[in-house]
Amino acid sequence: MSQKDLLMLEHDGNRVVLITGCSPGGLGPEVARAIRLTGADIFITTRDIAKGKQVAQELLSDGKPGKVEVIQVDLGSLESVRAGAQDFLRKSGNKLNVLVNNAGELEEINLYSGHFYLFHLVKDALIASASPSFNSRVVSLSSAAHRYGKIDFDDLNFEHTEYNPFAAYSQSKLANAYFANEVDRRYQSRGVRAFSVHPGGIITLLSRYLPSTKEIEEHPVISKLLQNPAQGASTTVWAAIAKELEGKGGLYLDETAEAERVTEDVPSYSGGYGANTFDPQAEEKLWAESLKLVGLRD
């Protein structure tokens, strides 16, 4: 992030931030690196504990104050999520100011439900940690691809229809936006606000849909919009701790700003949100279905 961006962030060394999906080379470590500059204690999750320790060691090498701890979590396993949440709460002293649901390699609803379950396991800490000067925050990584998404409530996991990677991806990113909208609606009165974020055209995310990195880099339009992970982390970091977002929530953010609604003919790599991004009825229905998936009651 630029110096100008950093000046807009809330600097408070007493905060605790939990960031999922922090494997080397992705957005997670860059989000952690930027937030760490505010003096916060950082907890990162990874499926592979060795890779997580590698990231933590690199982050700590800057000599800045604040700790970095690794929590092992496989978001595809509710048992792992539960164990990871317990480990985090024990190590953080039941304190949590910001939850960043960053893990982006998620295409199936049963993996989205891992984030949903994690939120429910740590929400009491979020509520208890909220203050008049800084509401606790939940940041949900979405994507402009959500504009092509549709929640198939009859077949959330493609068990009865042919699996399509992009359909699954766009559905999961729409689900992430719905999750943030519903969290904000349900918990803002208790001091918890939520945002969904489009991180931009990140080569690590786009590479799964185009045959090669070279094709991405040579695309006449996409190549001009590509960001590296450090650049792509900016909006997520802004959503997590920017001063100007205090008292706000339920927003879809893009390019460190509230995104604009765009028409269907605007390509997804240009960002923006669509007509499907805010749908209270569908959001409430997905919430109810998600509770069933993870075996919880409202």
Image (cartoon, grey):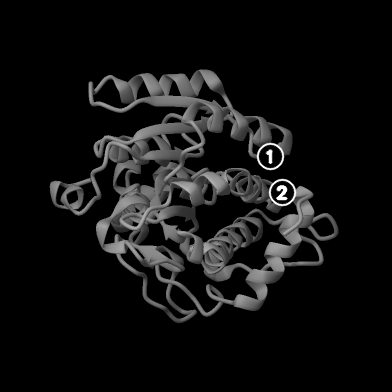
The residue located at (23%, 45%) in the rendering is 1
Residue under the image location 45 percent in, 72 percent down: 273
Mark 1 = which residue? 76
In x, y percent, where is residue 15?
Answer: 35, 40
**Disc 1 residue type?**
Gly
Left or right relative to 160: residue 272 = left
As helix, strand or loop, the secondary structure at mark 1 comes to loop
Q: Answer with mark 2 or mark 1, whichever residue precedes in sequence.
A: 1
Query: In the image, residue 166 lies at what x, y percent?
Result: 61, 57
Q: Residue at x 31, y 54 (%)?
A: 238
Amino acid type at circle 2 is: Asn
Location of residue 298 (image quadrant): bottom right
Where disc 2 sits, the SS reads helix
Q: Is residue 181 left or right of residue 246?
A: right
**Where does label 2 land, which residue?**
110
Residue 133 lies, in percent from the top left, at 30, 56
Q: CA distance from mark 2 to mark 1?
A: 7 Å
Q: Are marks 2 and 1 in contact (CB under 8 Å)?
A: yes
Residue under the point 65% across and 45% down: 114
Mark 1 closeness class: few <14, some 14–19, many ≥20 residues within 10 Å: some
